[in-house]
């Protein structure tokens, strides 16, 4: 399973490196979202800084939708999805590989957005360990549930609109916990951080487990 996951992850990342879609489209999209949020709230950093965590994770969430759609779009041409289904790879390995690829892309995006938020919103990047742990756990959860619902919507004519409708409500608990954890970190506090990290860890494990078990039947149905 893990060997198959490494193969699928490597394949997806090589495609992204060669096409540069994430670099040329997803990252600029997220940056524009962050800038527009700043313009909507005004130039006062006393207003922007307290909202930085929430605005950051909303931008990441919207970008995750694009990353997941891209993950399945690369296999929509020339019946590549059918070839993947008939390849003999473990469905759980395919799921984990796609999750790992989207995870890597989103973590790169988050690194860029973190500095953008610090620069534009005046957010103070304190407690780097908490910021990093929250980002990794939250992104695992977003990538896992995104890939699962990407498999549900793939192959349908309305997949571009169906995926956000399915994905965003289920991702809301992760968004909330990640925002709370980042709020604590950016404010320099420590009360409750462990609780929110635990919540993120539980959702990450839960979504990965559900996806590992359900991806095979979904792949066969598509």
Image (cartoon, helix red, strand yellow):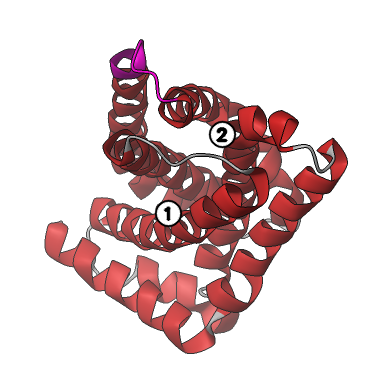
| Rendered position, 74 above or below 143 | below
Q: CA distance from mark 1 to mark 2?
A: 36 Å
Whole-percent x, y for residue 158 in the image:
76, 53
| Rendered position, 149 above or below 33 | above
The residue sitting at the bottom extreme is 18
User: To which residue does mark 1 refer?
Assistant: 219
Confirm whether the magenta stretch covers residue 184: no
Confirm whether the magenta stretch covers residue 191: yes
Disc 1 + disc 2, Cβ < 8 Å: no
Whole-percent x, y for residue 27 in the image:
60, 66
Depth order, front residue of 221/177:
177
What residue is drawn where x is 80% and y is 51%? 36
Left or right of 40: which side holds 178? left
Whole-percent x, y for residue 169 in the image:
63, 28
Instruction: Check residue 70 in the rendering and tell me which mark sits there, or answer none.
Output: none
| Tally of marks | 2
| Rendered position, 207 above or below 85 | above
What residue is drawn where x is 42% and y is 62%? 108
Residue 32 shows in this picture: yes
**Magenta span of residues:** 188-195
Instruction: Check residue 53 in the rendering and tell me which mark sits there, or answer none.
Output: 2
Per the image, label 1 sits on a secondary structure element best described as: helix
| Rendered position, 182 above or below 74 | above
Q: Earlier in the sequence, mark 1 or mark 2?
A: 2
Left or right of 200: which side holds 161? right
């Amino acid at each position: 399973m893990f060997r198959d996951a490494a193969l699928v992850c490597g394949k997806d990342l090589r495609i992204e490196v060669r096409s540069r879609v994430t670099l040329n489209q997803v990252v600029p999209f997220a940056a524009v979202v962050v800038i527009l949020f700043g313009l909507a709230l005004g130039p006062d950093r006393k207003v922007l800084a307290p909202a930085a965590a929430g605005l950051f994770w909303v931008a990441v969430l919207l970008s995750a939708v694009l990353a997941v759609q891209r993950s399945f779009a690369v296999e929509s041409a020339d019946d590549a999805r059918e070839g993947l289904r008939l390849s003999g790879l473990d469905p759980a390995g395919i799921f984990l590989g796609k999750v790992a690829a989207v995870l890597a892309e989103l973590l790169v995006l988050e690194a860029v957005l973190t500095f953008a938020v610090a620069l534009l919103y005046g957010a103070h990047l304190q407690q780097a360990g908490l910021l990093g742990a929250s980002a990794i756990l939250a992104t695992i959860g977003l990538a896992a549930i995104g890939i699962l619902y990407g498999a549900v919507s793939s192959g349908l004519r309305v997949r571009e609109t169906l995926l956000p409708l399915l994905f965003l409500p289920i991702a809301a608990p992760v968004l909330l916990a990640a925002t709370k954890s980042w709020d604590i970190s950016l404010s320099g506090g420590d009360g409750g951080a462990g609780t929110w990290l635990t919540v993120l860890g539980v959702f990450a494990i839960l979504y990965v487990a559900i996806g590992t078990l359900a991806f095979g039947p979904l792949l066969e149905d598509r």
